Image (tube, rainbow, N blue to C red):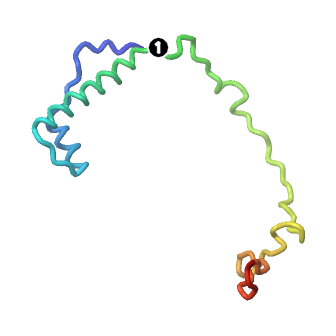
Amino acid sequence: MPNNRMNKSTISCAEIDRIAKASALELTEQLRERLRGDLSKMDDLFHSMDDIEVCPTKQSDYTDSACNTLREDIKQTSVKKTKGDCYAHYDESTGYFTVPKVINHDEPTS
């Protein structure tokens, strides 16, 4: 939907000062005016992008279709904890995995 914006945006000095304060910046008057112009141009660019028709086709309404129908939950047993998987080393009393020692510091490395 076109915006039909006739006037260019103007960023006030108070807004620039608020941004600078939030950013912990100290701005000179020259830099403040430059930032004000740059931000105004960016604002105009974004507002002009509102006039671009991105999707010229009619928007479909998929919510009326099968999106609202949900399947019934199927109860299944959880993964079995067997000796061949990682649960072979799970310690239920601590809640941690206890695995065999891999590194032996006593043996010299070659």
For the image shown, how many numbered marks are present on the structure?
1
What residue is drawn where x is 35% and y is 24%?
46
Q: Residue 89 in the image: state x and y as whole percent.
A: 80, 75
Give the residue pinned by disc 1: 53
Seen in the picture, residue 20 relative to 83 is either above or below; the reply is above
Secondary structure of the residue carrying numbered label 1: loop
* Placement of the N terminus among the 4 image quadrants: top left
In percent of width and height, residue 56 lies at 53, 11
* Residue extending farthest right: 83
The residue shown at (25%, 49%) is: 23
Q: Looking at the image, which residue sits at the far front?
A: 110
Q: Of 65 and 9, which appears nearest the observer?
A: 9
Nearest to the observer: residue 51 or residue 20: 20
**Residue 12 versus residue 62 in the image, above or below:** below
Q: Report the side of 11 relative to 89 (left or right).
A: left
Horizontal side of 70 relative to 53 (left or right) equals right
| Identity of the residue drawn at 57% across and 11% down | 57
Q: Residue at x 50, y 16 (%)?
A: 54
Q: Residue furthest bottom?
A: 106
Q: Nearer the viewer, residue 4 or 61?
A: 4
Q: Residue 44 is drawn in which quadrant?
A: top left
Quadrant the C terminus occupies: bottom right
| Left or right for 29, reference 45 | left
- Residue 17's place in the image compared with 107, above or below, is above
Towards the viewer: 18 or 33: 33
Residue furthest to the left in view is 29
Q: In which quarter of the image is residue 59?
A: top right
- Residue 104 lies, in percent from the top left, at 74, 83
CA neighbours of label 1 inside 10 A, class few (<14), some (14 to 19), many (20+): few
Residue 74 position (above or below residue 66): below
Q: Where is residue 43 in the image (x, y as percent from the top left)?
A: 29, 26
Task: Tell me which amino acid carries mark 1.
Answer: Glu
